[in-house]
Amino acid sequence: MSIFDKAMARIIREGELEIRYANGRVARFGKPSDRLPSVAIRFTDRGVPRAILSDPRLGAAETFMDGRLVIEQGDVRNLIDLFRGNAPAEDGGKLKGGFGSHVKRALTRIDRMNWERRSKRNVAHHYDLSDRLYDLFLDSDRQYSCAYFTDPSVGLEQAQLDKKAHIAAKLNLKPGLKVLDIGCGWGGMALYLNRVADVDVLGITLSEEQLKVARRRAEEAGVADRVKFELIDYRRLEGRFDRIVSVGMFEHVGPPNYRRFFQKCRELLAPDGAMLVHTIGRTGRPGTTDAFTTKYIFPGGYIPALSEMVAGSEGTKLIVSDVETLRLHYAYTLDHWYDRTVAAREAIEALYDARFYRMWIFYLAGAAAAFRHGGMVNFQVQYIRNRHALPITRDYMSEAEAALRAKG
């Protein structure tokens, strides 16, 4: 039995994996399962097993992207689910890194520092891709963050609308308040808050492409005088806001900058203000970003542990007033994005090429598996400066959310 066979035999205990090697040999692992899929793959050359063993996530991704790892039964989502499902986070399981992992961890720590001069470049790497790409797999409002599913059967459009209502309810909005949206994306959240709560919003971003779209949308909605967007780093912003919201941006801050982020937010937040940070998070202790994500998807990105967020805000005189963990919502969201991407394969390959398409579905499938089987969740952490800033029970949230959903 080869070293690769031994590794597969240790990992694949439930579900079935069939591998056809480049020399024609076939090996099978695991057993039939109602929980995990059966997958068959083929290696086109002898170097594929070595590439995967040396760095499982990056090696598997790149050999799949290059067409050297071919899936003959199932798809890449099934393949990743099979591996991650055999090492669920709840059981303490973890797929081991490859050789040289100490060096990779050191490089990751350097990369995730996310100095200000690097932040704009990192954002552009991902968010300045073709508008057409995002139109093909996101909802009509281009919400590129975890949706909120009141039921798993709810469609993506409704779930993203419900996400905005869920967040708005926690902000305890009143007409005329000034709201800051840090990392405003294509402007959907800012426009929604203005529409349903009659508030003025400033959205800030580091993506020039997102800025163009957000400003155009505000003009088209006739609210450009009340919903404004600027290309500026949060560290450079001045002013005072009654509410601050940040959705899907904290992943790009970097642990060395957490204290500075929260200090700046406190400076910007009115004394009786409230802030909500919605971010991907990890359920366990602090970790590192995997090589595939760093290289191809989110350079400089890092998923925080809750302990890191709280430690970052300690000493800034911000009060953690509410914490919610969304456990499966992003898995459901990513499933929708994956299905839409697969349906748009020809259009995406025409925009880029087949390798980019395979990279994108690997990214979405891997992320979904991390939320379904791994240690990834979403945190919504609410902060206030003054303990009297919000009602003393959470009833106001559910009451406001019901009213917002009624508005649609």
Image (cartoon, rainbow, N blue to C red):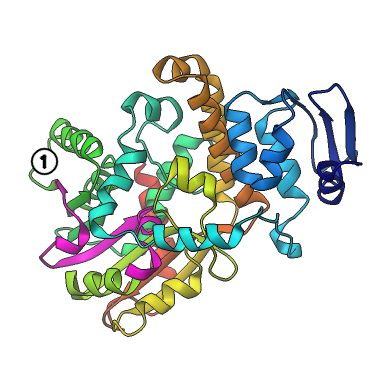
Depth order, front residue of 384/345: 345
Viewer-nearest residue: 225 or 4: 4
Number of numbered discs visible in the structure rendering: 1
The C terminus lies in which quarter of the figure?
A: top left
Image quadrant assignment for residue 50: top right
> Is residue 255 found inside the magenta-colored segment of the image?
yes
User: Which element is circle 1 on?
Assistant: loop
- The image shows residue 188, relative to residue 313, as above or below, that is above
Q: Residue at x 16, y 30 (%)?
A: 220
Image coordinates of residue 8 in percent, x first then y, are: 82, 44
Q: Position of residue 46 (x, y in %)?
A: 74, 29
**Is residue 154 among what the camera can see?**
no
Which residue is drawn at the image coordinates 27% and 78% (left, top)? 389
In reply to whether residue 237 is colored magenta, the answer given is yes
Q: Position of residue 326 (x, y in %)?
A: 54, 58
Is 22 located above or below residue 390 in the figure?
above
69 left or right of 164 in image: right
Q: Which residue is mark 1?
A: 224
Please give left or right for residue 357 compared with residue 12 in the image. Answer: left
Please state the extent of the stretch shown in magenta in the rendering.
Answer: 228-257
Q: Position of residue 359 (x, y in %)?
A: 53, 32
